[in-house]
Image (cartoon, grey):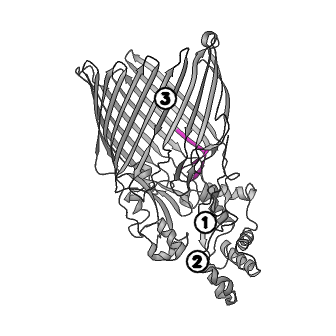
Amino acid sequence: MYKRQDTTNKNGPGTRFTDPNYNGVNYYGSATSVDINPFLQGALAGNPDLAPIINPLLAKPNYVARTGYPEYGYLDNTARMFKANAEFRYKINPKLEAIMSGTFGTGSIVYTNDTRYQLKNFKAAQYRVELKSDKWFVRAYTTQENSGNTIIAGPTAQYINEAWKTSYDGNTGGWYPEYTSALLTALAGGASLNDANLAARAFADKGRVELGTPEFNALKDKISNTPISEGGTLFLDRSKLYNAEAQYNFSELVKFMSVIAGVNWRLYRLDSRNTLFPDKDQPINVKEYSAYVQLSKKLAEDKLNLSTSFRYDKNTLFSSPKVTSRASAVYELAKENYLRFSYQNAYSFPSNIQALQNTLSGYNSYSSGGSSYLLNGTYHFDQYAPYTLESVTAYQQSGNASLLKKFEYNDIKPQSVNAFELGYSALIADRFLFDVLGYFSTWKNFIGYANVANTPGTNDVSAFKDHSTYVQYNIAFNGGETVNTYGYAASLSIDLSHNFLAKVNYYSDYLKNKNNSQINNFNTPHYHVNFEFGNTGFGKKQVWSFGTAMRYKPGYFYVVSGGLAQGQVPSSAVIDAQVSYKLIKAHSSIKLGGTNLTNKYYSTGIANPNIGAVYYLTYAYNVL
């Protein structure tokens, strides 16, 4: 079970009863926000007698958000999944096997990425053919996607509001003129500013379509079934991946060391019809080529194991290929005591999402890649300069254009890392297995995100005062400063005899980013602690078994890239347990268990569901 209704205001400390610009994390539609000062000025020009009421209000911006719809009742959080797979294997000879397999899945679920999405009837399939020998394999597969009827929560609700009553019709009508008129009427009648804002909202919302009504559902269905490229919120993603690879083990040809080599070819066919990628005219083809070799050798009476590997990668989105290298050593200090060390110099190309994503995440808001193909070709940053969203917000709140700060951007490029790891493990008295490790990495051209905005069609910065005349983006870009990641881990497993086992592990991760303008998406606590205790077989014929686990993590700060939400995720301690019984003669087993047994709700991130307990009873046949 889980529940979700985060009412935290993303626009300030107030609530929906105290802040006219309220925009709740799990309220949708209230991202539409306008400074009503132009409407107040229009009212003053029409009736100068209102000056005692209006002039004090004009001393600062007065942003008002449209009324949002709460998630409960708006999104269907019921998860439905169906998956099927089939595989055919044929032994051509004792050392050669042919394999054909297929996997298909479909379902509906709500998930959080840069905003909240309701995936309805999405489909994914993978098909594989392979020839496999004891020394080599040749494999080809394809993965194909169908986004189904996916709803983007925020924009869909905003468009529902606009379809019911436009924010402003360009003349004297619309939700904001009605709000302003009712606000002034209430203030003239002696109401406090807060009460006047509440009365104005009630007046402007009169007759608003309500959740669950036929009128609401009709608007929702029409908008969510109209492609994004045609003014709706429907994805039309039919992207495909094709991959072919081969590997050969040269152990019979090279006797003095182990040599494994392989090649890989991959084609991404990005086909979203301009709803996820900038592929308006035709699908975008991205090709990758790679080759690798791995060498290993045992020395010092097999106590020392040395290995190294090299990999060549080329991506057609980027001009230069990259070479990755890795080296490792494992030394047996004493019987069942091992010291290990590894070093890696690696490059990683930006993913297709980091390079080319063009996803609607809100009204005039996009989650975006960082390639110049997109930034200049689609967003026209080279003509209409981007500014940091932080400075745009400061300008909106103050009216001071000198606070605007341009965002310096370049074509996104591969990031690189130098990584070191040192570890030690030991089996003591055949009962205690101990392992400890530490790692440290230094990144260059680290890929993070930044919130920016521009005004397509004009360089007049006053366009930033109305969201209908500016567009904001959450773009991927390379930081100019180095980034360090580091951490350590330790685990202890104990054989308590009679099939009783106990285990505890601790691990930590840290990131230090000197690029202060970057949003890292490093949403993880500084450490985790896990405890496990169980028995793999007890009782007569050892048909009973059980397992318990406790997972603890401290509170941590969480940022949803794209501006959906940010905040502190509380600490959590979750207990899971399971008991099982084997029906040996029936080749079956029965399992009774639960996750989060205490049913204390916890969250894995801001704007995500709060997760409660799941209790289950399962029967499995032909598993013994």
Work out whether residue 300 or residue 209 is closer to the camera in this orientation and state it. Answer: 300
Q: Main secondary structure of the magenta part?
A: strand
Q: Secondary structure at mark 2?
A: loop
Res. 150 in view: no
Among the two numbered marks 1 and 3 on one chain, the one whose residue lies closer to the N terminus:
1
Question: Which mark is drawn over residue 32?
Answer: 1
Determine the CA span between mark 3 and mark 2. 65 Å
CA neighbours of label 2 inside 10 A, class few (<14), some (14 to 19), many (20+): some
Query: At numbered mark 1, what does the secondary structure look like: helix, strand or loop?
Result: loop
Q: Report x, y in % for residue 347.
A: 33, 45
**Which quarter of the rendering shows the N terminus?**
top right
Q: Is residue 77 visible?
A: yes
Q: Residues within 10 Å of mark 3 (few under 14, many from 20)?
A: some
Residue bearing the label numbered 2: 60
Residue depicted at x 38% and y 35%:
244
For the record, the magenta segment spans 109-124
Foreground label between 2 and 1: 2
Residue bearing the label numbered 3: 101
Category of crowding for the residue at label 1, using alpha-carbon neighbours closer than 10 angstroms: few (below 14), some (14–19), many (at least 20)? many
How far across and how far down the image is residue 94, in percent? Answer: 39, 14
Whether residues under marks 3 and 2 lie with C-beta atoms below 8 angstroms apart, the answer is no
Q: Amino acid at mark 3?
A: Ser
Q: Is residue 7 rendered magenta in the image? A: no
Percent x, y of residue 624: 58, 15
